[in-house]
Image: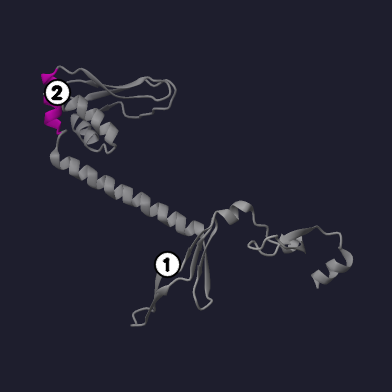
Amino acid sequence: MYKLYRELFKKDSIQILVRKDFTKTPPEYVQYYQEDCTLIYSYEISCVQSIKNEVPYVISYKASKFKKQGVIKSLDIGLYNIVISFNNGLNITIPTDFVENSINKNKSKLIDINTANDILDRAKFNKYSESKLVNKIKNNNINKWIPSYCVICGNPVIFEFKEDKVLINNKCTCGNVTSNKKEMSYKELSAWLTCQTDKNIINSYDKFWLSKE
């Protein structure tokens, strides 16, 4: 009814040319009212990965023995939707963000698991035990250590070694490096060194601590 009303009384509504087929050359266009169209931008067309007759699938039903295997006719992964097309004409459309968010969460969990395993492996070797740290500090007369510098103002974080504790002196003036902790025990220092997982940081700390006997 609205389309009839529009054609009779709202002929001045905005109309646009829509390309009929993106494979034909020269292209053919048809005129439609803009409000009847869903506009697709060029990047939406370009940003589509299409996999034809390669992706396997298995369909099963609960605990029954029913199982059907095959190859998906077409799997199209766009910016906003994933379209699964089967040979029988069935199409399934899934919003991309649900899948993407889940994959990112799984990657984050995997990183956490690997990090935890790395820490356990480092703890087994016990290179930074409390007693070893105390002995190294005493034997080498180490009064302080600078583990890092602020990447913005360039000022250091200084660990000062006392008889029974480690004082943390944060010299950062720009606020980029923040720490509520003003001191720690040697046991905490041992745990902190052991829990480092970044290879560059590990190499830097090892160079300072493990080269001193």
Tag shown at residue 54: 1
The foreground one among 201 and 157 is: 201
Q: Residue at x 12, y 29 (%)?
A: 132
Quarter of the figure that contains the N terminus: bottom right
Q: Amino acid at mark 1?
A: Glu
Q: Please state which amino acid type lies under the numbered disc 2.
A: Lys
Residue 4 x/y as whole percent: 83, 71
First in residue order: circle 1 vs circle 2: 1
Q: x, y (%) of residue 16?
A: 77, 58
Tell me how far mark 1 sits from mark 2, CA to CA: 58 Å
Q: Nearer the viewer, residue 196 or 27?
A: 27
Q: Which quadrant of the view contains residue 14? A: bottom right
Quarter-of-image position of residue 170: top left
Q: What residue sits 39% from the left and 21% below the top? A: 172
Q: Residues within 10 Å of mark 2 (few under 14, many from 20)?
A: few
Whether residue 170 is visible here, answered yes or no, is no
Left or right: where 36 falls relative to 188: right
- Residue 24: x percent and y percent? 66, 63
- Residue sitting at the far right: 9
Left or right of residue 181, residue 188 in this image: left
Q: Residue at x 39, y 20 (%)?
A: 154
Tell me if residue 54 comes above or below residue 90 in the rendering: above
The answer to whether mark 1 and mark 2 are in CB contact below 8 A is no
Element on which disc 1 rests: loop
Measured as percent of width and height from the top left, residue 102 is found at 42, 57
Residue at coordinates 15% horizontally, 25% vertically from top-left?
Answer: 211
Q: Which residues are magenta?
A: 129-140
Q: Which residue is mark 2?
A: 212
| Number of numbered discs on residues | 2
Element class at badge 2: loop
Q: Is residue 182 magenta?
A: no
Is residue 133 covered in magenta?
Answer: yes
